Amino acid sequence: MRGFLKGSETMSDWCFLGDTRPALKVLGPSNKELEQGKATLMCVANKGFPSDWSLSWKTSDSSGSISIRGEESRTPGVLQNDGLYSWSSTLTLTADQWGKVGSVTCEATQGSQSLVSEILRRDQCSQS
């Protein structure tokens, strides 16, 4: 549970809210980065509560049958002014691996909460 105490409010004025599922956004690699042989994807999770949501990645080739592995990194939850948390995770692939990707999925999980996911298909990203 979380609460907000503002100005001259007392404990009895607090508003307690339950768990909040974060909104996810997956960002693809830049063309400049791909030219350098690397592809970094970022998953941004906003407005979640409590702070212990975990972010993970799933990748598959264009047929959906082969998992493509890359290097993952995560940031801890950052408390925002509204009492909710934001997180991010990056997945780094080689440009060759990215060329074989059909889709990437960022998943957020926390305890018994239902899964939150966002999918980015490679063909949604602009190619130059």
Image (tube, grey):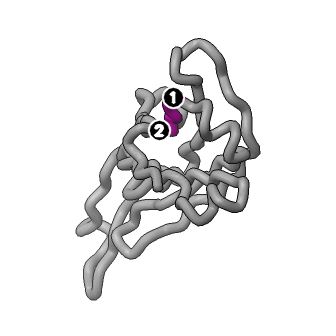
The amino acid on which the numbered mark 1 sits, given as a three-letter code, is: Gly
Q: Residue at 53%, 16% (x, y): give it.
A: 64
In-front residue for pair 11/112: 112
Q: Are marks 2 and 1 in contact (CB under 8 Å)?
A: yes
Residue 42 sits in which quadrant?
Answer: bottom right
Q: Residue at 75%, 45% (x, y): give it.
A: 71
Magenta stretch: give its range.
Answer: 102-106
Residue 65 sits in which quadrant?
Answer: top right
Q: Is residue 59 left or right of residue 70?
A: left
Q: Residue at 36%, 62% (x, y): give it.
A: 3
Q: How far from the left and from the top, in percent, is residue 26?
A: 45, 48
- Would you place residue 44 above or below residue 114 in this image? below
Q: How far from the left and from the top, in percent, is residue 33?
A: 63, 62
For label 2, the residue is: 122
For label 1, the residue is: 102
Q: Please state the total of marks drawn on the protein image.
A: 2
The amino acid on which the numbered mark 2 sits, given as a three-letter code, is: Arg
Report crowding for label 2: few under 14, some 14 to 19, many 20 or more residues within 10 A (C-alpha): some
- Would you place residue 35 above or below residue 104 in this image? below
Q: Is residue 29 left or right of residue 12?
A: right
In-front residue for pair 12/52: 52
